[in-house]
Amino acid sequence: MPANSRTKPNPKDHTGNKKRVLADQHAEELARRKGELAMHHAEQAAGLDQAIELDDKGRTLQAVPDDAGAEEGPVQLPPEKVTIRIACDLEHVTIGQGTDFDFKEGQVYTVPLNVALHLDRLGYVWQWL
């Protein structure tokens, strides 16, 4: 025999009743906040495809204008770098002496080749780009 669905809320359900009253009072604010949260999550997801460039010590490199340093000295070649996407969150990963890396799941990173190879050996690289 199927259970009868209630048409009225149970008067003994104080928590449920209070929740319904507060939801009715703040329906407009909740709808606005829901839109804000959706935009926040979309912005975070969009930022995962922009590569973060890390140096040999695990520090984030700042963007340098194309004409900076063009008039000085001999050309110095930077170490070989590769672009990878990480499979899971990693915090305080030490690869080599004096290095400390932090990685966020799904984020694209530009890292030295030795760091990428080490992470790939351990199974932490999701995708080589």
Image (cartoon, rainbow, N blue to C red):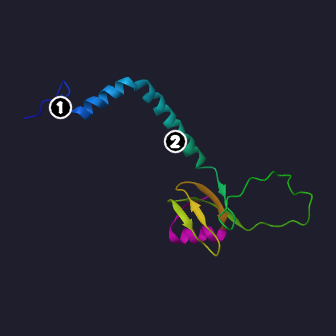
Nearer to us: label 2 or label 1: 1
Which residue sits at x=65%, y=55%? Answer: 52
- The region drawn magenta spans 113-129
Relative vertical location of residue 8 with respect to residue 116 in this rendering, above or below? above
Which residue sits at x=49%, y=36%? Answer: 38
- Quadrant location of the C terminus in the rendered image: bottom right
Q: Amino acid at mark 1?
A: Lys
Q: Classify residue 41 as left or right of residue 110.
A: left
Q: Is residue 126 magenta?
A: yes
Q: Which residue is mark 2?
A: 41
The span from disc 2 to disc 1 (Cα, nearest Å) is 38 Å
Q: Is residue 109 or residue 89 the one in the foreground?
A: 89
Which residue sits at x=91%, y=65%? Answer: 73
Q: Which residue is mark 1?
A: 12
Q: Is residue 46 or residue 6 the one in the foreground?
A: 6
Q: Classify residue 90 as left or right of residue 68.
A: left
Relative vertical location of residue 62 with respect to residue 20 in this rendering, above or below? below
- Image quarter of residue 60: bottom right
- Image quarter of residue 62: bottom right
